[in-house]
Amino acid sequence: MDTRLDQNATVLAGLRISVGALFLIFGQYKVFGTQFTLGGGFQFWINRFLSDGAYPFMVPVLRDFVLPHGTVIAFLVAYGELAIGLGLALGILVRPASVCGMIYMLALLFSSDYPGPDAVFWQYFGGALDHLVLALCFAAFALGNSDQVFSLRSYLRRRRSARSQ
């Protein structure tokens, strides 16, 4: 493999593993604790999104669908974050995990980062940086070969080729 390709694959894998570790941290406290899922933590954040300003098209979704099904969706979020983190950190099912992560980040962006109706165009991006940057990372993981190195998939592929020789 070309040294430059090898370096790019290693750097992309490092970013993938780092983002995966963050999602493992986010997911594990939600899955193994009860404050977020059963203690009203999820509903607290949805209500905060509604009071601080969600994008107008998200308000009825959050108010009329998400809040009434809050506990179920809280478990979906908790286990989803954990699954995304495991997939990225271990390098398994990276593309599906990345697509789910990108959808999740866009949902958070539209639920919490509305700069207001009178904002100039660039403020939409400035207000969305915390979720937009991760969404772009997920896009890179989904479109690239971020599981080429430092992944369970690459380990199994090397092991299989060594056995066949």
Image: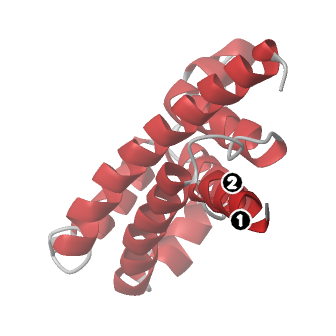
Above or below — where is 18 with respect to 32?
above
| Place of residue 68 in the rendered image (x, y in percent of width and height, measured from the top left) | 43, 84
Secondary structure under tag 1 reads: helix
Q: Residues within 10 Å of mark 2 (few under 14, many from 20)?
A: few
- Cα separation between marks 1 and 2: 5 Å
| Place of residue 50 in the rendered image (x, y in percent of width and height, measured from the top left) | 43, 54
Indicate which disc residue 158 carries: 2
**Is residue 116 visible to us here?**
no
72 or 1: nearer the viewer? 1
2 or 35: nearer the viewer? 2
2 or 64: nearer the viewer? 2
Quadrant showing the C terminus: bottom right
- Tally the marks: 2
55 or 10: nearer the viewer? 10
Secondary structure under tag 2 reads: helix
Above or below — where is 120 with respect to 66?
above
Q: Residues within 10 Å of mark 1 (few under 14, many from 20)?
A: few
- Left or right: residue 97 compared with residue 20: right
Quadrant showing the N terminus: top right
Residue drawn at 44 percent across, 85 percent down: 69
Residue drawn at 71 percent across, 65 percent down: 160
Residue drawn at 64 percent across, 62 percent down: 156
Above or below — where is 22 with respect to 74?
above
**Is residue 92 visible to us here?**
yes
Q: Which residue is mark 1?
A: 160
Q: Amino acid at mark 2?
A: Arg
- Left or right: residue 130 compared with residue 124: left
Q: Amino acid at mark 1?
A: Arg
Indicate which disc residue 84 carries: none
| Place of residue 119 in the rendered image (x, y in percent of width and height, measured from the top left) | 65, 20
Examine the image and state in which quarter residue 143 appears: top right
The reply to whether discs 1 and 2 touch (Cβ–Cβ < 8 Å) is yes
